[in-house]
Amino acid sequence: MQEPTAPGARGVTARALIIACLLLPFNAYWVIQMEVVRYQGHPTTVSLLYNSIFILLVLVLGSALTRRFAPRFALHRNEMLVIYLMVTIASVLAGHDMVQVVAPQVIMPYWLATAENKWEQLFFDFLPRHLTIRDPRIYTPAFLGYSTLYTRERLLAWLPPAMSWAMFLAVLSTMMLSINAILRRRWMDLEKLNYPLTHLPLELSEPRLPLLRNKLMWAGFALAGAVDLVNGFHEIWPVWPLIKVRVVHYDAYMGGLFQGFPWRALAGTRISFYPFAIGLGMLLPLDLAFSSWFFYIFWKGQRLVSLLLGLERIPGFPYVEEQSSAAYLGLTAFALWMARHYLRDIWLSLRRQAPRTDSGEPMSYPVALWVLAAGVAFLGLFSRGLGMWPWLAIVFFGLYFAISIAVTRVRAELGPPAHDLHRGGPDLILTNIFGTDRSVFDPQQLTAMKLCYWFNRAYRSHPMPIQLEAFKIAQVAGIGQAPMAIALTVATFLGVISAWWAQVHLFYVYGIAAKTSFATTTFGREPFQELASWLQAPFPVRWPRIGAYAVGFLFTLLLMFLRVNFIWWPFHPVGYAISSSWSMNCLWLPILIAWLIKAVILRYAGYKAFQEAIPFALGLVLGEFTIGSVWTIIGIVLQINTYSFWV
């Protein structure tokens, strides 16, 4: 065992920070190559980022080797965890629902504008010049590729929008850090939530490497790794056999299965057997695993019944996205209601009417509130630059932080493999409630909300739950909470800059319209296409969708009430919230398999036997993450298509 007083035990050391900061640009390049250029792997679309786990594994093995020959240079476990967490927070900021979406948004409306779509007449006057680039001499080479970012003219043109949005995202993340600092003790020390997604990095980095010495872990590793090895060789040499575990192999089959009336309502149902998802599913609480696949079938049943009753003629019915976004808000409302006495005590302590309880926290409660206040002031000024009304900015960002708290709480308590919530952001909630027919919102307000589309497109790649999980890892490993907050802040600012650099650099190298994936164009087109639709075909208040919000919110509270009051109640409200997502369409069957395995072990072998089986589950995750990461690196280095184990 490493002693707590050993060099590096405090984790946030100079060499840990230096190593992490040096890794951030390379990691951002890796993530952007996978998700933007090659459109393979998509590590930031699942809860546990495999690129970060792979880097942690390399650090663990490298440190073990170094300890044999030069012990003084070997990294301490806590230093490796700090590096892992800094890389992880930087990865989500570079991810699918963050910088990857906003970077093309800077130039896409001007590239896609035509006389037919009338974008220039509809909303160009409402686009802030400091957040976009209008000069075709700057953006045309980014679409055509085989060029370079590194000319004085291009660097100066990209600097204002990139730094403006980077500062906005950094401030947003810092505000989340302060909210986590306030809620940490309630969720971690008083409620003692489980934080399942912290298990693998903590187990992997244990001194003396007990996980890597476990035979069951290596059995799971070998099983998942063999699947990825065989499929990887098949991708390069098609004569090799193929083990069909990815969803892509079944799309055409399932699309052909569900045809005609009424089965076309189930079209798009996907079947997959991801080993890593089965491993993660075995770590889920049994009621959440059950609820995840049950409510997935529940949503499919809604669509089927709607078609049978002829209700599919109503646009959007049965309003799945609206029910899901309201469910997230319901989870936040319940969590804050349960914490009301705790929050009251914090307020009283700030007024010196109760004892202070913030000793050892990531930041003191007064500092956290000052950070929040400064962040609110910044958002107010930024929103004014967008042309957004003050009351609208308050409601818009209030909804965003409410959803963010729900995502954070869900991961802290239950650790689901994914949490998407596509089309559930404040822009759609507010336009459904108030309409777009200018009775409330003018074109400037609609444009301002759509400029914030990028961090509300979905909620997969999200920094707030990573921050809270970092505090949990710090608590378990004995790392100071305040130093961890500093490390996360450094990683946030450098991570955002690295993400912007990697994204824009690769635009000019490959060309958005030439060799990058379709996703870049899609990300940049979506908000302005919908904005044009709002302006050309405005709609009034959508009462049926408001009803769906009410149903989703109240049903979530009902499920939570029943779960709290009846131990035997099997349906978890989190399953209702997350199971309608795009990711769950890919993961429902692996979670069902994991639920069945776990239920059988617990029923017939007992809890102790399941505890002994956990290393096998971790091995499934680690095996697929490791071999899958190696294939992506080989593909990037050799510029060839390689096997992508996820999606």
Image: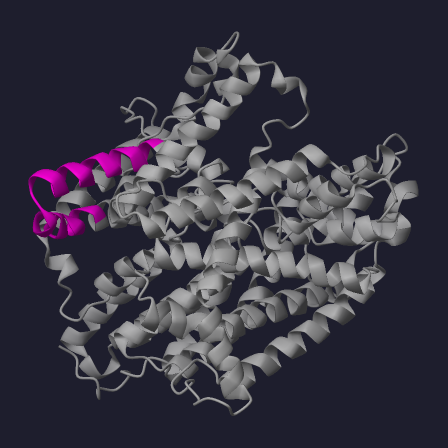
Residue 6 falls in image quadrant:
bottom left
List x then y, in percent, for residue 142: 71, 48
Residue with the most extreme bottom position: 352
Q: Quadrant of the C terminus?
A: top left
Residue situated in front as seen by the camera: 531 or 133: 531
Residue stretch rendered in magenta on the structure = 589-617
* Relative to 527, residue 1 above or below: below
Please name the residue shown 33% across and 60% down the image.
195
List x then y, in percent, for residue 168: 67, 67
Residue situated in front as seen by the camera: 274 or 410: 410
* Relative to 419, residue 588 above or below: above
Specify the principal SS of the magenta part.
helix
List x then y, in percent, for residue 499: 57, 60
How is colour applied across the structure in the image? Answer: one colour
Horizontally, residue 420 falls left or right of residue 394, namely left
**Residue 611 included in the magenta stretch of the image:** yes
Q: Quadrant of the N terminus?
A: bottom left
Residue 308 in view: yes
Residue 83 in view: no
Horizontally, residue 66 falls left or right of residue 472, namely left
List x then y, in percent, for residue 568: 26, 43
Count all numbered tags in the image, as a single digit: 0
Horizontally, residue 296 falls left or right of residue 287, namely right
Please name the residue shown 65% across and 55% down the image.
504
Residue with the most extreme front position: 565
Please name the residue shown 18% across and 44% down the image.
220
Please name the residue shown 74% across and 61% down the image.
393
Residue with the most extreme top position: 260
**Residue 558 included in the magenta stretch of the image:** no
Residue situated in front as seen by the camera: 402 or 585: 402
* Relative to 9, residue 419 above or below: above
